[in-house]
Image: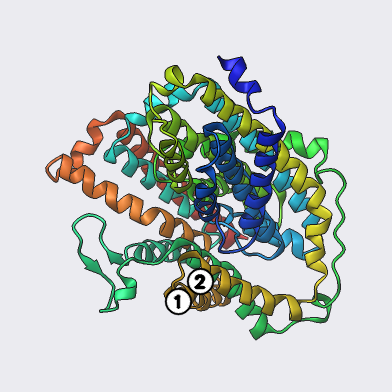
Amino acid sequence: MAIEGLISVWNPECMLIILGGVVIGIIFGAIPGLTSTMCVALCLPLTFSMSPLNGISLLVAVYVGGTSGGLISAILLKIPGTPSSAATTFDGAPMAERGEGGKALGVGLLYSFLGTVLSILALIFIAPPLAKMALKFGPMEFFAITLLALTLIGAISGENMLKGLMSGIAGILFSLVGIAAIGGAQRFTFGLYQLENGFSQLPVLIGLFAVAEIFHTAVEGIRADDMQIKKSKVHGFGITLKEFKEQFVNFIRSAMIGIGIGILPGIGGATSNVVAYSVAKQQSKYPEKFGTGIIDGVIATETANNASIGGALIPLLTLGIPGDSVTAMILGGLTLHGIQPGPLLFKNSGKLVYGIFAAFIIATILMLIVEYFGIQLFVKVLAVPKYILLPAVLVLCIVGTYGTNHNIFDVWTTLGFGVIGFFMMKYKFPQVPLILGFVLGSILEQNLIRGLMYNNNRFLAFFKSPIAAVCMLAAVGVVIWTACGQIRKFKQKKAG
């Protein structure tokens, strides 16, 4: 059955469908505001007239292409094409600014491919046991893991931990705006009905990174050297064998983070992207170089967000639980064809399952080929003078933001967070902790409330769960370790 399923996609029709899905996904991922979720939603009606295998292959191909495509605008335009590529801007964009855009794209593409390959292996060989483990995670475990992730704020705050903590707290506060998911209370809406749904993730990211950069450039002015065309050449994937060996631990660690976070329902690639970057910086021998344009950051983020694809498909296929918004759409595609994901799927529809695995593999290979041959075309964006490029980018941000939900309030959100990001850059407040707080804040709150309701408002009961207890103790340990490191740095600086 497995062999039949794997060879079922090897026909011209299915291969063309997968290729088309990958190309469409890359285009949607590369254009700010057009996410892979939107692309899968638009392609869903196209699957009605297809066979189940062809239809799901199209959706999986769009998912793979859309997640990887976000790195193109993240590196070249300093705009996260999708929420999953937000942290790719931190080091990818500085590399492009100094003429290494081709190298950044090559490295990002290679590790997008490798991260996806590892997640495919996890999906094929260890899906059932991993899914069973994820099933044991309740609100207490989710709260503890999210709390542990938030302790990374200290590690990514730079030299000024106070500013980093203030930025992180601001991100959490922004995530609480709107009607509470549990209880229905209105918070920080100030009587505006537009704020009842809170701030959408994509407008916030585009505002903080893209619009803020445009405002900053407008105020500072364009220097003469910014007017010059930056030549960016790349040979192969832009990484040497020595660099590849040096980054192996970073790659494996980031892939495990991506797969693990992908398995946990409702968290997704946007979180794994930022968490992997934070952990890479924390574990690095030269954390001060992160944010200046080094491949370590690009490798961590692009490995993690693509590894989360296979991770998110694990609970979908084995338990019928979507791991993120895109797999929720794929779940809809499966049910439309009368297929019920879950423990019996492998037994009742084994041929289809292995066909999906094969489509996943082929889509990943095609993604690598399409983007590799497009690198030299992509880097030509850097040849456009900034006084032409930046206004065009601003228009693209506005159009893309509006196109997400067809909501003019999202446009105002983008511009508002652009102003906030501008002042953060001006007064040297790190933006990464704000993003981490914003992405994880609502997850932390909802699972805390659910856990307290489950335990009759007794927080100490959280420690009865071994997983939650270990994660919370680890969070305390990380805080103490980070604080000791900051004190040591302060003493060294004072002594010097």
Q: Nearer the viewer, residue 116 or 242?
A: 116
In this view of the protein, can residue 136 be seen by the observer? yes
Residue underneath mark 2: 402
Q: Position of residue 188 (x, y in %)?
A: 28, 72
Name the quarter where the N terminus is drawn.
Answer: top right
For the view shown, which residue lies furthest in the left direction? 456
In percent of the image, x 79 and y 52: which residue is there? 374
| Mark 2, secondary structure of its residue | helix
Mark 2: few, some, or many residues within 10 Å (few <14, many ≥20)? many
Mark sitting on residue 258: none
Callout 1 amino acid? Ile
Residue under the point 42% across and 60% down: 438
Q: Nearer the viewer, residue 431 or 199?
A: 199
Relative to 132, residue 426 above or below: below
From where the camera sits, is residue 291 visible?
A: no
Which of the pair 321/229 is nearer the observer?
321
Q: Secondary structure at mark 1?
A: helix
Residue 338 image point, x, y percent: 41, 33
Residues under numbered marks 2 and 1 in contact, where contact means CB atoms less than 8 Å apart = yes
- Mark found first going from the N terminus, 2 or 1: 2
Using the rendered view, name the quadrant where residue 91 is placed: bottom right
Say how the picture is coloured: rainbow
Tag 2: amino acid: Tyr
Q: Position of residue 399 (x, y in %)?
A: 57, 73
